[in-house]
Amino acid sequence: MTIYYMIVFMLLMVEIVSFVILSLPLPLKVRRAILNAISNSPFAGRVKHVLKITIICILILFADSVRRVVRVTKEYDLAIAAPSTTESARSGYKASQFYAQRNLYLCGSALFLSLVVNRYYLALEAMIAAQDKMQALQTQVEASTNNAKAVEELETLRTKLETRDKEYETLAEKYAAVTKTVEKKKDI
């Protein structure tokens, strides 16, 4: 395997490991810490840039692999049609066809998995942002329910105060009436 296909294979392994790490059922705090480290790291920014360039190179290798598979398949079909082809020539064609297909599947898998990892990462970021927003809204709802309870308590206290004021007024009127009658009795 040539050096660039070894690099593609290593990238494929890194993508598999990163997908497994992102897919683990981790607690929200740990997952948020991992995603924040990836998002905010200056090293991660450089790695993302290098990966974009590498993906473009893998795309070129994929196109070349498709071309090779088509060419090798045509050569093999022509060799099979020729009656003078020996078994060793056929095995050589089969080997070159195998290598071309291996490279095709390797590049295709790396491209597909890079797309999957990227989309999964973006979905996780969106999910964590939504969970943060949900937690903020829950705290606001709890605060508003606490405020609603305080308002209800204030209203009940106001009604109690109004009833006490009415009772005070009626008692004051009764007291005034009683004092008038007592004063009239004193005057008599």
Image (cartoon, rainbow, N blue to C red):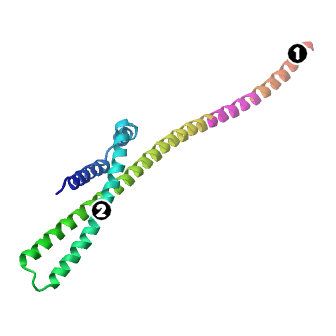
Q: Residue at label 2?
A: 62
Q: Does residue 79 lie above or below 174 as drawn?
A: below
Q: Which residues are magenta?
A: 151-166
Of 129 and 151, nearer the camera is 129
| Of the image marks 2 and 1, the number of the one nearer the N terminus | 2
Q: Which image quarter: residue 1?
A: bottom left
- Dot 1 surroundings within 10 Å: few (below 14), some, or many (20 or more)? few
Q: Pointers 2 and 1 in contact (CB under 8 A)? A: no
Disc 1 residue type (three-letter): Glu
- Dot 2 surroundings within 10 Å: few (below 14), some, or many (20 or more)? many
Mark 2, secondary structure of its residue: helix
Q: Does residue 129 lie above or below 84 as drawn?
A: above
Of 76 and 133, nearer the camera is 76
Q: Does residue 80 lie above or below 60 as drawn?
A: below
The location of residue 109, given as percent across then percent down, is: 28, 60
The location of residue 33, given as percent across then percent down, is: 36, 38
Of 145 and 157, nearer the camera is 145
Query: Magenta stretch containing residue 159, yes or no?
Result: yes
